[in-house]
Amino acid sequence: MNIRKIRIRLVLTGIVVLVLFVINKEYLRPAFQNNEVVSIIVGSLPNFLGAYLFSLLPFERIIKSNNKNRKAYYYLYVAIIFIFLIIEEFFPFFTASKTFDVYDILASGMGCILAILSYEITIKKMLIKNQAS
């Protein structure tokens, strides 16, 4: 997997995440506000998408680096994103949210975990392709 493919996948992922965010806000939240379980999911979806999207920001740069510690750097970056989102949940200063919701923290954690899984899968594919070459 070369850097160009990674860049294309990151751009497409960003577009999909932004489209999901708009669909959630405009259609899903209003449609499922009376269903308690689905309401929790669509209510926390922006946290999941935000955690995932922000965790992917340095993805290409870290993968391109030849640093032995790039995995540790990426994990640290994702942990900082998660900590920031937890603090934001308790003390909102960037969002309009005025209520604490534990589901938002769980969704943020799941978004960060998905970003780490995406990183690991990408690295494994790169290693497999390099060994085959």
Image (cartoon, rainbow, N blue to C red):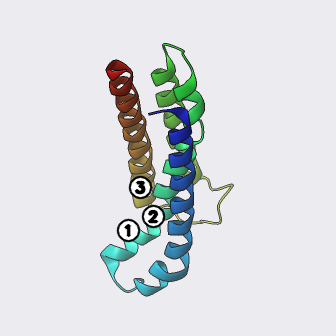
State the image quarter where residue 58 is shown.
top right
Asked whether 64 or 29 is in front, the reply is 64
Residue depicted at x 34% and y 29% = 124
Asked if the residue at tag 3 contacts the one at tag 2, i.e. Cβ–Cβ closer than 8 Å, the answer is yes
* Residue assigned mark 2: 45
Left or right: 69 in relation to 114: right
Q: CA distance from mark 1 to mark 2?
A: 6 Å
Q: Which amino acid type is shown beneath numbered disc 2?
A: Leu
From the top left corner, tell me how far across and down residue 46 is, in percent.
51, 62
Proximity of marks 1 and 2: CB atoms separated by less than 8 Å = yes
| Residue at position x 61%, y 53% in the image | 91
Callout 1: 10 Å neighbours few (<14), some, many (20+)?
Answer: some
Give the amino acid at mark 1. Answer: Ile
Drawn side of residue 89 relative to residue 112, left or right: right
Query: Is disc 3 surrounded by few (<14), some (14 to 19) or many (20+) residues within 10 Å?
Result: many
Mark sitting earlier along the chain (3/1): 1
Residue under pointer 1? 41
- Mark 2 and mark 3: Cα distance apart in space: 7 Å
At mark 1, the secondary structure is helix
Q: State the residue position of label 3.
A: 107
Which label's residue is closer to the chain start, 2 or 3?
Answer: 2
Q: Position of residue 102 (x, y in %)?
A: 41, 57
Viewer-closest of 21 and 41: 21
In the depicted structure, whether residue 102 falls above or below residue 54: below
* Residue displayed at 43% across by 86% down: 31
Callout 3: SS: helix
Q: Residues within 10 Å of mark 2 (few under 14, many from 20)?
A: many
In the image, 67 versus 8, the foreground residue is: 8
